[in-house]
Amino acid sequence: MGQLLAILGGEPVITENIFKPWPTITEADKKAVCDVLDAAGEERLWGGSGPSTTKLQDAWSERIGRKHTLLTNSGTAALHTAVAAAGIEPGDEVITSAFTFVASATCILHHNAIPVFADVDLDTFDIAPASIEAQITDRTRALIPVHIHGLPADMDPINEIARRHNLVVIEDACQAHGATYHGRPAGALGDMACFSLNGIKHLIAPEGGLFCCDDEEQFARARLLQSFGEFSDPNLPREYNARSLGWMYRSTEINAALAYSQLQRLDEYNAQRQRNAAYLHERLSELPGVVPTPMSEGVTSAYWLFAYRVPLSEAPLDDVPQVVWRETVAKALNAEGVPTRQWQTRVTPAQSLFQTHNAYGRGCPWDCPHGRRISYDLEQYPNAQRVVEQYLVLWHPETVYWNLIGPPNGLEQMSALADGFDKVCSNLAALIPLAREAAENNE
Ligand SMILES: Cc1ncc(COP(=O)(O)O)c(C=O)c1O
């Protein structure tokens, strides 16, 4: 394609909004929620042990092959629950990914433990097993690998490291409902797993989380933490005795009913994501200047987001910083009607919380008697830094049409997106003066 790029005044490839918003709410979803409301008075809508909650928990356990699932009121709550269930104590160290959503790390702080970050693989953006090994100390108690953008982390070597060092493995599968790793589902790849049911995820409540495990002791600890530290048995009178420190992480029957109804369509939705991603992957892999996250052998991504890199090595310009090139490409794609931007804009340990060691105040938990003031020097995460410098995702910059790779968007939308990429990537040379100008202006 030799046409004038839209950013230079040409006609955009996509001239109207063809993208459809997520989530899809069906009549069945509405009925499921209304049925719960209609049952008020006969069933308790709260409390964490109603029929919709139980049905959802049982269905999820069966689906991923776990003994236990607990519905919580967020993915973050599920992660904190897992940290507590792992028996983590103040000052213990837990390793997670340097490129993730902040909750993968704050769940560790929530239990007064110390988050330690491991670097990632440049291609997959997932935590790198070798970097985990390098961060292990005699204080390390657990690992929280994150299946970033829905692509499972390399769990076999991670579990092997955990076995050798006697560490608990908690999967952060908040973005990975339906992903698989060598035939096994995300959620059944470590000792415990957590999913988010937030409205932009594959399965919506539209806020909520799922904590999953097999071990009875871990499950008992999780249940205490989830509900005030009290032991609860719906068949016995309430004790009103906090046996340990608890939170209030229960959800409601309304959220459970919506998630259960949506669960009936999860496979269909995920299949559409797979089709969309496979199509885009094929088209983009042929283009210069853009490197889509690879489709690994034996591993199925749940494609929460479609991510790709625009490395400058594909268009070497000594006088243009990588981030300026990335933004120039993003602007050119946006001008063609391809909605793209970044999700995380910095590596996780670069966030002020970690750089200033300011969580609870007074430097705790790092400076508390059991803690240790570890360094979050960003030099430790070179690949994560390169990812942040180079990556973009398909995501509308301004509107709620967040999840372009997922349904209800289909091949019609993917084909238009690929045409937009085709045009920009076939005219990369035309972007060089724009990138140089932006670099000179420090944009
Ligand atoms: C990787 C990851 N972990 C944890 C969470 C937290 O989930 P929630 O928003 O349901 O608390 C998210 C949410 O985006 C996430 O992406």
Image: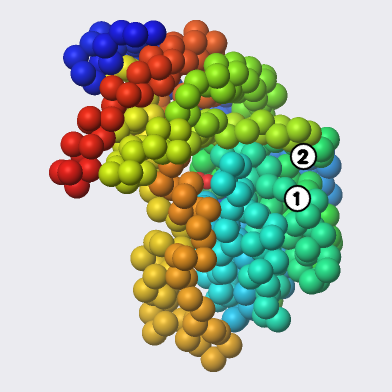
Quadrant for residue 391, please give it. top left
> Closer to the camera, 137 or 380?
380
Q: Residue at x 75, y 50 (%)?
A: 155
Q: Residue at x 39, y 37 (%)?
A: 316
Q: What crowding class fits label 2: few (fewer than 14 Cα within 10 Å), some (14-19), or many (20 or more)?
A: many
Q: Amino acid at mark 1?
A: Met
**Label 2 to label 1: alpha-carbon separation:** 8 Å
For the N terminus, give its image quadrant: top left
Circle on res. 268:
none
Residue 206 in the figure: left or right of residue 441: right
Residue 441 in the figure: left or right of residue 114: left
Give the image location of residue 374, x and y in percent: 51, 78
Residue wearing tag 1: 155
Give the image location of residue 306, x and y in percent: 52, 30
Mark 2 lies within 8 Å of ligand 1 (Cβ measured): no
> Closer to the camera, 408 or 247?
408
Circle on res. 181:
2
Q: Residue at x 83, y 35 (%)?
A: 183
Quadrant for residue 45, please give it. top right
For the residues labelled 2 and 1, say whether their Cβ atoms are less than 8 Å apart.
yes
Residue 128 in the figure: left or right of residue 25: right
Q: What crowding class fits label 1: few (fewer than 14 Cα within 10 Å), some (14-19), or many (20 or more)?
A: many
> Closer to the camera, 272 or 48?
272
Q: Amino acid at mark 2?
A: Tyr
Instruction: Tell which residue pokes out farthest to the left in this image.
Output: 441
For the C terminus, give its image quadrant: top left
Instruction: Tell which residue pokes out farthest to the bottom in this image.
Output: 369
